[in-house]
Amino acid sequence: MENCRIGVYICMCGSNIAKIVDVEAVEKYISTLPQVALVRTYKYMCSNPGQEMIVQDIKENKLNRVVVAACSPNMHERTFRAALRKAGLNQYLFEMANIREQCSWVHDDSKEATIKAMALIRAAVMRVELHEALESMFVDMCPNSLVIGGGIAGMTAALELADAGYQVHLVEKSDKLGGNVARVDLTAPYLYSARDLLTERITRVMNNKFVHLHLNSKVTSLTGFIGNFTATINEQNSKITKNHKPVEIPIGNVIVCTGYKEFDASRITHYGYGKLPNVITSFELEKMIRAGRIETKEGKIPQYVAIIHCVGSRSMEFHSYCSRVCCMTALKYTHEIKSANPQSYISDIYIDMHAFGKGHEDFYKHTSEAKTLFLMYEKNDRPVIRRADPKDDCEMLIEVNEKLSGEVIEIPADLIVLMVGMEAREDSGEVARLVNISQDKEGWFIESHPKLEPVATTTDGIFIAGTCVAPKDIPDTVAQARAAAARILAKISKGKIEVDAVYSEVNEEICSGCRFCNKLCPFSAIEFNEKEGHSHIISALCKACGVCVASCPSSAIKGRHFTDMQIHAQIDGLLNPVQYIEQKV
Amino acid sequence: MAIRINPKFIDDIDRFGAEDVQLCYQCGDCSAVCPHADDTFKFPRKPMRRLQMGLERKIETSLEPWLCYYCGQCSDQCPREADPGETMMSLRRWLISRYDFTGIARQFFKSRATEILAIIGIALLTLIYLYYFSFSKGNIHIYDGKGAFLPSPFIHEFDLSVGLVLLVFLAINAFRMWYFTMIKGIKVHVPWWLYIKHILTFPWHFFTQKRYAECESKRNTKIFMPWIIHLGLMLGYVIMLVLVMVFIEDLQYGPEIKWQAHIFGYLASIGLIIGTIYFINLRLSKTAYVQFKKSHSTDWVFVVLLFFIVLTGVAQHIFHRTGLIEYANISYVIHLMCVVPWLLRMPVSKWAHLVYRPLAMYFAAIQRDAYKKHEVQSNSFSISVK
């Protein structure tokens, strides 16, 4: 083993660490450890002077390993690794001991905490002795992108990438572009025409030479890894299929914009959807509005129109989430119905009015001005629809426990509109498996961080945007599509991508080809070489989770930066007893 | 049993002045700020909700609109500019039309033209009536006594008969109010002796309008200002009505002034003149108080017609005492042409609040006691079961 010169830096984190952990005692103890060349304590290691101190010490004291005992590596590992790079030392010759979250913050006994801090730092010191200098790999980034789904999100993302001058393959399952937005008449709250929004997008997609449109098509397979995928696109139009072969296209990144489907209203039996002819869904009303006539099945102008919110949403039975767009869409309907049939009386039966967006609250107020009757019902006390008597002046009656008046009331209605919520498409599972991303319990695709990484997934090079992630309105969808495109453009512009040096490797000589690891890998990063009879890990896909390392019966897999030796040393460092003589102050 | 809502009702109430009630989203700020809302009578939020939903029966049987004296704090506070104060005012108009068994009130509230035409019609009928039965036989140069243009005994009888019609109509409407609010509108039993216990509430509130003062005192304006003027106007009005109905012959007597009647007449006239001018001014300027920002056509008819009556009455008196008998007689005819439609309009117009308001305070006191009694009884019952 080379001659280790380890520098250990103990951070006080203001008083966050120092008020519980006796840092001076720790310093004294750590300096007794072999290989430790230098120990320092400092108020804030993460500050610029703190980092500068490490850089200086590496240069002046010829340190070749560094341990920082401070907060969680989630917080500042990158910071200190950068300091090592700056000093010309390989960034992997570094280890962090977490003596804040895992020690000072969770203990109130100073002595015990100090002993624990000593053990944590000793573990880090013993581990870092065995660290190897690792170099990141660089792989080529293919500039072509694949966009799955030709709705507003897919078209927007494709145009964004194409406008930057890169090839985009836009794959749409149906025979036309536009997705769910194409089924809508006007949009809330500014009452812009949805058709106008789409026409502009569609025309640009059709005319853009960088966008390769695949209608009636499906992506049947996606292999490879970020920057180096191969997508197989299969055209499904029955007329051509016979003489049409699937095409294979090299792809660098993928954006999934497969959208949503609406909730099936007939699942709520006491709304009578499918049985009562004049109970319709919001999409059926859109159809009427687009046809230019809002009428009952009998062809009459409805005198009383009722709109019921949260159909399938915000209920324990169906979907617990809010579908986000229905409240404003319902308000939009009252405007559209009132302008088509000014004599109509509209009852808006809601749970809570979610008017969170720009211009939404004003829109809500304007709807009130148009004399819409807002009636509130309890979340788990749904309205019940029944046919009215012949002597009534309406066709149906909705019985509901109205929350704001405290009365059980009957609402007359000739036409009832059910605001059906959004749900994940039935083929979303298939798509998730195709591109290797995960879904939540409702079937929505999971982003890699809900706040900071809203369009990225845990698979590098696969992005998600729009309503396949969660219910959202058009502005949010467009923003996500553009965000995903921007992320991809940033990657393409670098030309090459850096692959983290921490990944697993198969020692092909030892590998017996049992293929246990192939099935276990959650990132599909292991491929099997049939010819040679052994497994191979695609380092760009590997996230270094270590499942394969643990599962290999022949111990043929090594986790770089997490070798057995390193981990054993760390455990020894933690568990060996610490001699601690309390200082008298 | 579910109550049927009536989405059309909001269109109907629109003409009564509640133009903004649909803006209310039931936050309840208005009820929180209201100095008069209590545990038994909650408003304005609840009545506003009933109005939005068109629960006519519930509104018809409620006393709440009468317990509001329109200080306007609710309208100032309202985050949605739904104007709860004006909504309560509109509900009072609607209730007046509901209590009125003839249906005339409803027509007047809904159409300004109908009301003005009716007033002109009654005024002309009065003129024709007076012509046939009185001044065609008399001399325009004589004010009272033999050969008088409008002899006081005739006027006395005329006044009394108009007064009787008024009284009958008003009594029937007040009876309907009692029936709606105290029979249909209350779920608990009301013992008869509660009516006796609270009997003084009616005259107390009639003569003091105390609740109006309480409303104003909560506001940061000149203390008692609209209240004192309103009280002066009302008392002047009532005194004048009594004088005209009972002591008309003393008032018309000449040439010397009978001070025991006239001193009240002068005081009443001062109250009426100041009151009408003050309120006309407030309604014109629209700035001083929230409650005068919006004026319904019936509000204008009320105050303007009263102003004319006072003006012609005063003119007639001055002409009579200064010897301009012809002018006095002409003023008198015009005065009567205003007075008759005014009096006949009473039970079907805003004026009726003179009776409904103290009556509502009386009924409310009874209801509060009845509910309290019921609560005590039901509580003791549940304890004995345990």
Image: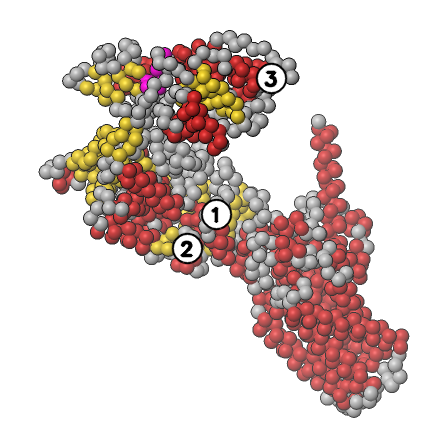
Which badge, 1 or 2, comes first in the chain's sequence? 2
For label 1, the SS is: loop
Q: Are marks 3 and 1 on the same chain?
A: yes
* Location of residue A313 in the rendering, given as x and y in whole percent from the top left corner: 43, 38
* Residue at the far left in the pictured view: A243
Q: CA distance from mark 1 to mark 2?
A: 14 Å
Which badge, 3 or 1, comes first in the chain's sequence? 3
Q: Is residue A472 left or right of residue B358?
A: left
Q: Are marks 2 and 3 on the same chain?
A: yes
For label 2, the SS is: loop
- Which class describes the residues within 10 Å of circle 3: few (<14), some (14-19), or many (20+)? few
Q: Is residue A556 above or below residue B228?
A: above
Residue A355 is tagged as 1
Extent of the magenta region: A559-566
- Which class describes the residues within 10 Å of circle 2: few (<14), some (14-19), or many (20+)? few
Residue B90 sits inside the magenta stretch: no
Q: CA distance from mark 2 to mark 3?
A: 61 Å
Which residue shows up at 71% across the image and 77% down it? B308
| Residue at the disc numbered 2 | A190
Please state, as top left, top right, bottom left or bottom right, where the C terminus of chain B lies in the image: top right
Which badge, 2 or 3, comes first in the chain's sequence? 3
Q: CA distance from mark 3 to mark 1?
A: 50 Å
